[in-house]
Amino acid sequence: MTGKIIVIGGGIGGLCAAIALRRAGIQVVVYEQAEQFSEIGAGIQVWVKGMQALRLLGVADAVRAAGAEVHQHQFFNADGVPLYSADLAALARDTGAPAPVMIARSALIDALATGIDADESVRFGHRVSAVQQSDDKVRVEFAGGGSDEADLVVAADGINSTVRRLLFPAARIRTASYRYVRSLVEHPAPFGNKVFAMFFGRGNRIAVGDCGDGALYWLVGLKRPTVDLGGAPEVLKADLLRRFETFPEGIGSVIEATPADSLIHHTVRDLQPIETWGRGRVFLLGDAAHATTPNLGRGSGVAMADAVVLADLLGATDLTDAGQLATVLEAYSRSRTPEAHALQRTSWRIGNITSWDNAVMTHARDLMMRTVVGRRQVAEIGEQFVQAAALQPPGQRWGNVA
Ligand SMILES: Cc1cc2nc3c(=O)[nH]c(=O)nc-3n(C[C@H](O)[C@H](O)[C@H](O)COP(=O)(O)OP(=O)(O)OC[C@H]3O[C@@H](n4cnc5c(N)ncnc54)[C@H](O)[C@@H]3O)c2cc1C
């Protein structure tokens, strides 16, 4: 297949797009604004569908080796009373889908970079400031001067995407009513190896996940933060220790062991759903197209699956032909938007419910989680494994590359 594609952004989505496009036989250049891979943000869960996409891209083993499989999801109230749990190891065994993986973000990026020749394909220190389309080409311009041209641009430049703002200036970003604090710490897993455990209190929730090799990823949701964004990290840490002091044993010790200056404190946002992920010779992928609130830990998996589907469609396309690109854009959007938009909606709703701080409402919520909602959640997780096992490039042109 001839033709050249520029990928904007060397994050999770951009790297997966580059790997997938290269596997489809397309020439790819990635432009990343940072001077080097610079993924921060503690850890990340790569959900089952993401792992299946990475399996198709040939990098699942590298990711698994750099993190830890998640074998159990366990949910509790603030007193440690079990609400529901899911046996992910059994689901993986029964369906043939890969178990999710918990991993440090920097390790995930390094593992993804093994899938391409990063030295050759990734140009660091290039911030794209403008994109100009003509009938048969698209040109990107860089903030520091200079430009490059290709048949197609895939913009994977994240929730604040410059390219999306140029294409869809009206697409809004909304901010949730709660904040997150996250970190990664060297600490034994207090709730078991390969376990992701989450505890719901009144307005305060905390999750702890084992990343393997003695590293733990933890994150906190705060309905009523009292420490300013950018406030002193020691004050934030003291506030967290106070908020979670009555939670089950092990939580305080994880927070205590975490260096205050490693705390990442931020607002939580998502993007208004966009129906068609691009225009002409510019397509969107990952958070640039469908950023979601992170309450289900699945956003990156959607970006990974975007990459698989898009590359498979483009692999059979004459990139110089605007008509064929229009057909691909339509097929790509139709294939990917149902899952992405459903995740945006569900994650927003779950974020609100798990942030409730009213005593009566949280009591009712916990009761529902122990019964009907918990059963529904477990069934939905099982369905995710079944769907993941079925995820193949639509045309299956790559064959089995696991
Ligand atoms: C708090 C939080 C927790 C999360 N937890 C999970 C989780 O557990 N599991 C999960 O699956 N997902 C999770 N997510 C979502 C996940 O982080 C995103 O879905 C994923 O990072 C999207 O990748 P991306 O490549 O599309 O965007 P980004 O990761 O934002 O990458 C964009 C890249 O583009 C570069 N860039 C930006 N603008 C330009 C420009 N103009 N020119 C050149 N380069 C540019 C940036 O430097 C960056 O490298 C979480 C998100 C948040 C906020």
Image: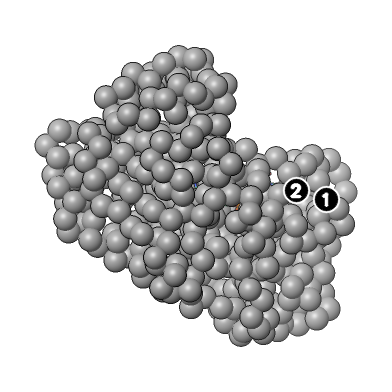
Whether tag 2 and tag 1 are in contact, CB under 8 A, the answer is yes
Tell me if residue 343 comes above or below residue 367 in the rendering: below
137 with respect to 57 (left or right): right
Label 1: element kind: strand
Q: Residue at x 23, y 56 (%)?
A: 374
Q: Quadrant of the C terminus?
A: bottom right
Amino acid at dot 2: Glu
Query: Where residue 180 appears, x then y in whole percent?
Result: 43, 34
Residue 180 lies left or right of residue 61; in this view the side is left
Viewer-proximal residue among 127 and 315? 315
Residue at image position (74%, 55%) is 113
Residue type highlighted by circle 1: Arg
For marks 2 and 1, the one nearer the N-term is 2
Label placed on residue 123: 1
Rendered position, 386 above or below 210: below
Q: Name the residue rendered at 78%, 76% in the picture.
A: 25
Residue situated in front as seen by the camera: 139 or 195? 195
Q: Residues within 10 Å of mark 2 (few under 14, many from 20)?
A: many
Point out residue 208 in the picture as x, y percentages from the top left corner: 42, 39
State the image quarter where residue 365 is shown: top left
SS of the residue at dot 2?
Answer: loop
Decide if residue 4 is in sight here. Answer: no
Q: Is mark 2 within 8 Å of ligand 1?
A: yes
The structure's colour scheme is one colour
Label 1 within 8 A of ligand 1 by Cβ: no
Residue under numbered circle 2 = 32
Quarter of the image where the N terminus is located: bottom right
Residue 302 location (% of width, % of height) = 52, 61
- Name the one closer to the observer, 318 or 23: 23
In the image, residue 393 sits, relative to residue 152, either above or below, namely below
